[in-house]
Amino acid sequence: MNRTVIRGGLVVTAAEEVHADVLVEGEKVVALASYGSGVAEGWTADRVLDARGLYVIPGGVDAHTHMELPFGGTSASDTFETGTRAAAWGGTTTIVDFAVQSVGSSLREGLDTWHAKAQGACAIDYGFHMILADVTEHSLKEMDLLVAEGVTSFKLFMAYPGVFYSDDGKILRAMQRGAENGGLIMMHAENGIAIDVLVEQALAAGKTDPRYHGEVRRELLEAEATHRAIKLAQVAGSPLYVVHVSAASAVAELAAARRQGLSVFGETCPQYLFLSTDNLAEPGFEGAKYVCSTPLRPREHQAELWKGLRTGDLQVVSTDHCPFCFSGQKELGRGDFSKIPNGLPGVENRMDLLHQAVVEGRISRRRWIEIACAAPARMFGLYPRKGTIAPGADADIVLYDPAARQTLSAATHHMNVDYSAYEGKEVTGKVRTVLSRGAVVIDDGAYLGRAGHGRYQPRATCQYLD
């Protein structure tokens, strides 16, 4: 069995920071030894990694990605192979993607389709949530079966009528089932019925540019849907996880529910923390690059999102990585913003952007690891196998250089998309080495991984509810 020792680094987890050496045997962490204890002196290894001057952190867990997602007559440009490789370059070692049930089909058919896409293709470990697009007696029964085999979270949509949308009755029934079987309900909280009216009115008035995407998807319609989802969950006795929270008023709804003692959780994404409607309004058709849903908000919302991350009213930062190339895909919406495929690339940038927030004093180092690694692992039943560095955990470990400078750019990223949402942004901090289950997949600017190394991860139920 291969033994690796990581020497001389500052081990940073959500719980502590300690100067320690780490011993890996095969795919697992087997021991940590703090400096000066003398314990590590007797360790022998096949490979020694020098981590002096570096952070030694758990591999990132990105709990919201959409590889190969069909949307608006096209498909997300990252495959499971290219997307997971890019994730590894950015220090993420586990993704949880979304399998999609089509209306009229079973959950099993959707899950099997996504298993077929991912199997043998992934560079890092992966799991699946299930998008519940057709709530029927049959699909409700299937929820029980999926939870039993480790697909323990189900996403519903209050948006996209005619595609993914579920009405309040269907949402309530799914929540009731989740309350019984332990499945966590994830919610895209926007009032899609009202948004469709505003889209129609904007287009009729000749308002076709990308910036109107943000204007019709009103903040109030995110807040209203978030409030409604919370109340439906309360009626059902169900926990609730609201995805891609972008609006200050939606954060306020989550905070109020949590003050009442409700099991309500929130996720935000780097695009809402670092980008704004200023990007949607870029001249020409450039704003199309930034079309995603929920949409980017005016810059003043960012302060409330950061505050929510500091106070714990928002628990997780995921990417909602769903890339579409500007050329040939985003361009489908020239002359009609409603036809621009919704989604941004970001799976490679999340860990670096959040470290930049540490550099700027917005969050602490331990909170960085909490929101990017430990909390998503706990939320979706992967902890402590994922999300920490401790004996028995998978050896998903990143050696991170906190002083390295880099400029984010499409010219240097590894995502299969022709632009960067953060083009030209300078950040401090960069991945040096990445281990996935003990195997070195990135080292000093070289990719050493392979398609098929990544292993499917069945998940326990939400560990914040234990």
Image: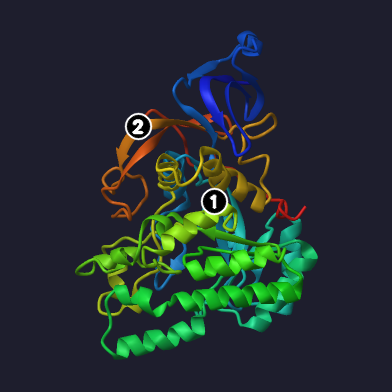
Question: Gap in Å between the C-alphas at discs 1 and 2?
Answer: 25 Å
Q: Outermost residue, left direction?
A: 284
Residue 327: tell me if it is visible.
yes
Amino acid at circle 2? Ala
Q: In which quarter of the image is residue 179?
A: bottom right
Helix, strand or loop under label 2:
strand
Task: Decide which of 9, 227 is in the foreground and name it.
Answer: 227
- What secondary structure is found at the residue carrying circle 1? helix
State the count of labels: 2
On the rendered image, what quadrant is the N terminus found in? top right
In-image side of 270 versus 462 (left or right):
left
Mark 2 — residue? 404
- Mark 1 vs mark 2: give the one in front: 1
Q: Can residue 66 be seen in this view?
A: no
Q: In which quarter of the image is residue 282?
A: bottom left
The kind of residue on which mark 1 rests is: Arg
Q: Residue at x 23, y 69 (%)?
A: 285
Q: In this view, does 117 lie to the left or right of 420?
A: right
Q: Residue 310 carries which label?
A: 1
Q: Residues within 10 Å of mark 2 (few under 14, many from 20)?
A: few
What residue is rendered at 31% in x and 86% in y? 203
**Above or below: residue 148 compared with residue 17:** below
> Is 287 left, or right, of 26 in this rendering?
left
The percent coordinates of residue 351 (x first, y second) are 45, 43
> Which of the pair 237/250 is nearer the observer?
250
The mark that comes first in sequence, 1 or 2, is 1
Q: Which residue is drawn at 33% across and 67% down?
A: 277
Image quarter of residue 188: bottom right
Q: Where residue 330 appears, x then y in whole percent?
A: 31, 67
**Residue, x 28% and y 80% (percent of image)?**
208
Return the x and y of residue 261 as percentages of the image width and height.
72, 63
x and y percentages locating residue 176 in the rendered image: 75, 73
